Amino acid sequence: MARITSPLWFGLKNLISKPAIGNLRVKPHLTLTQKSLSTTCACKVKQITVNEVDDKIVIEGKVVPSPREKYLAKLPTNPTGCKECPLCRLGLTVRHTDVLIISQFVNSKGKQLPREVTGLCREKHKRMDYLIVMAEKAGLIDREVERKVVHNGLTYYEPEEWDEPHFHKYYDETVIDEFLYSRRKRH
Amino acid sequence: MSASRRVQQWLTFTRQWWLFDAKWQDPFESAKVINKHLKGAHKPIFGGHADCGDHVVVINSQDIAMRGDEWYYRVYFHHTGYPGGATWTKAWELHKKDPTMIIWKACYRDLEKDLTRRGRMQRLHIFKDSNIPKDIIQNITDQIPQLRTVPKRLKDYSQEEIEKFPKLFDYPKEHVLD
Ligand SMILES: [Zn+2]
């Protein structure tokens, strides 16, 4: 490890056995922050429900069968090129109007799922990020995203007239290549 | 001349009526296709000597689509002729006032700037929705295909359709639904 990301990591280095450190080295951020350090699955939960009954809050974790199990697409066995992500293996070029595909990569609030869950490669993950924003701005999917940017202690909103008329918009996916591969000069 | 050849001759020199549905279409891309039919450039007899332009009826012009934020940065200029009479109108402001105007201006701009321009524009009939007068709809014989497919919102699909669509990946075992 070239640099130490957090003091926690520095302390753990002497406590955990070598193979465990090998696992940690892959994604030190994730293992320390999101998942607790335990050998068994600490959060073997599918759905968390919160109920309020007469001054009591009941938080319940249920193991739910996956709703996608029956309808999984068959991926080709001998792929060429990228061998991990489903989009490369199928050779799909997704457009921002393909809402049934885009909505699979999004949770109930409209945020993009991480790469550990979706299994996309780095390039396709970034590409999907742009596609989700395009579909949201074109009004094809709904998201709970605040149109607000906080920068240097100041908050910026989009101008009011930008939200007012709900005229149709469409987007061109070829600009994503420009975002990803070429540095664009702005004046 | 046989009867079928005679009918073919009549059809060649009559003015045909075309229907174009502007729903989710880019006005500047579709203006090129509309103008091709207004000039009659799709006919083999087209040339400088032949007045063979067709009529085009554009419906649903209030549902046109523009790329990205073009509604906000495309500006229409007008000058009354008096000092201080210049106005700049954004595309969304113009579309709010008159939903047929953007597609009219796009066609007018794309046509050749000569004496045939006004005559060709007279053969363009734009309606903001699909209510067409009866004397116009009875003339229509054919339809110009749309340039881009009309997208469907996720709301418009039923819950069963969304569930049964082929899924590209399954959730991992320790995934928490949220
Ligand atoms: Zn890939």
Image (spheres, coloured by chain):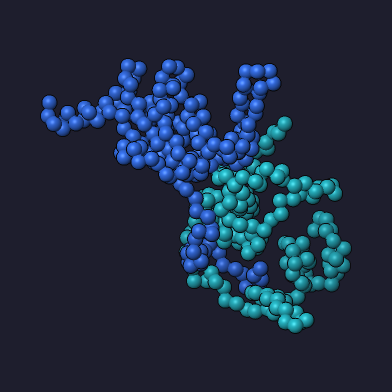
Chain colours: A cyan, B blue
Which residue is depicted at the point 81% across and 55% down? Answer: A2
Q: Is residue A111 left or right of residue B53?
A: right
Q: Quadrant of the C terminus of chain A?
A: top right
Number of marks present in the image shown: 0
Give the x, y percent position of residue B167.
Answer: 52, 64
Give the x, y percent position of residue A46.
Answer: 64, 74
Q: Is residue A99 visible?
A: yes
Give the answer, above or below, for where A108 lies relative to B100: below
In this rendered view, identify the residue nearer to me: B78 or B31. B78
Q: Is residue B133 left or right of residue B161?
A: left
Q: Is residue A179 left or right of residue A8?
A: left
Q: Quadrant of the N terminus of chain A?
A: bottom right
In this rendered view, identify the residue nearer to me: B15 or A28. B15
Give the answer, above or below, for where A101 lies relative to B111: below
Which residue is depicted at the point 53% across and 34% down? Answer: B102
Give the x, y percent position of residue B104.
Answer: 49, 31
Q: Residue B80's image quarter?
A: top right
Which residue is depicted at the point 83% across and 58% down? Answer: A5
Which residue is depicted at the point 29% across and 23% down? Answer: B45
Q: Is residue A22 visible?
A: no
**Outermost residue, left direction?**
B2
Give the x, y percent position of residue A9.
Answer: 83, 64
In this rendered view, identify the residue nearer to me: A179 or B63. B63
Give the answer, above or below, for where B175 lies relative to A142: below
In this rendered view, identify the residue nearer to me: B51 or B48. B51
